[in-house]
Image: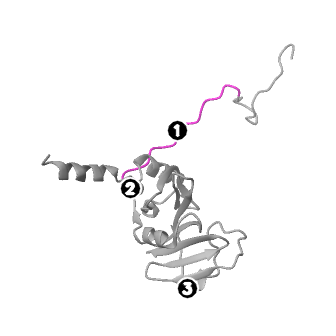
Amino acid sequence: MKNTPLLLALLALSACGTQGALSQEAIDQARVQGAAPDLIYVVDLPGYELAEQSVGAVNEEGFGAFYVSPDGKQVQLRVDRDEFSDALCATRPVTDAMPVDAPVRCSRDEVGWYRQAAGRHEYAAVRGDALLLLAARLTDVGRETLKTAIAGARQAAVTGTPSPWPSPVERGDLPTTGDGAPDNEVGPGG
């Protein structure tokens, strides 16, 4: 079979998952919730896939999403307008660390800041006015994987205007006058 190399190449390409891709529906979901288009990022995490139902806005205009492995491990990506520095590194809590005031171990490298506290770790990286945080439990993902993923973080391709929220469901039990409380009047026999 002389087309075997071509067939193998196509199979290899088709096996590449969409772990770092973000559907237009997920982008619209985040934008409608208030995420700024320039703060919508994706990362590539081998062994993890983006949980699109987790995609949404964080704070006023930030972005957040979870990546999950088949065995339930999670990595959280958060992007918001913020600053970060060596001075903040040890004083700012690590994402989801409990207790919040757990001591933070900090080290800086060419990618950003690697931080650990209370069984959790994260990489923090600054891109312009955006602060990217990629966080997980120490047992869920290794430091090098976090580092590689945050180093390769990229903005999602955001196009157009998001679809509007669906209109509310019309309820027949809401009065048109008064305080708008449902009509729970008891009828005969009851």
Residue shown at the point (39%, 65%) measured from the top left: 154
Say which label, 3 or 2, has the lower sequence index.
Answer: 3
Q: Amino acid at mark 3?
A: Asp
Q: Is residue 110 magenta?
A: no
Q: Label 3 vs label 2: CA separation? A: 32 Å
Residue shown at the point (53%, 59%) measured from the top left: 64
Expressed as whole percent of the image width and height from the top left, the position of residue 33 reads 53, 52
Q: In what element is the residue under mark 3? A: helix
Q: Is residue 158 magenta?
A: yes
Density class for disc 3 (Cα within 10 Å; few <14, some 14-19, many ≥20) is few
Please give the label number shown on residue 166.
1
Q: Label 1 vs label 3: CA separation? A: 45 Å
In the image, the segment drawn in magenta is: 157-173
Which residue is under mark 3? 86
Residue sticking out furthest to the front? 1
Which residue is under mark 2? 158
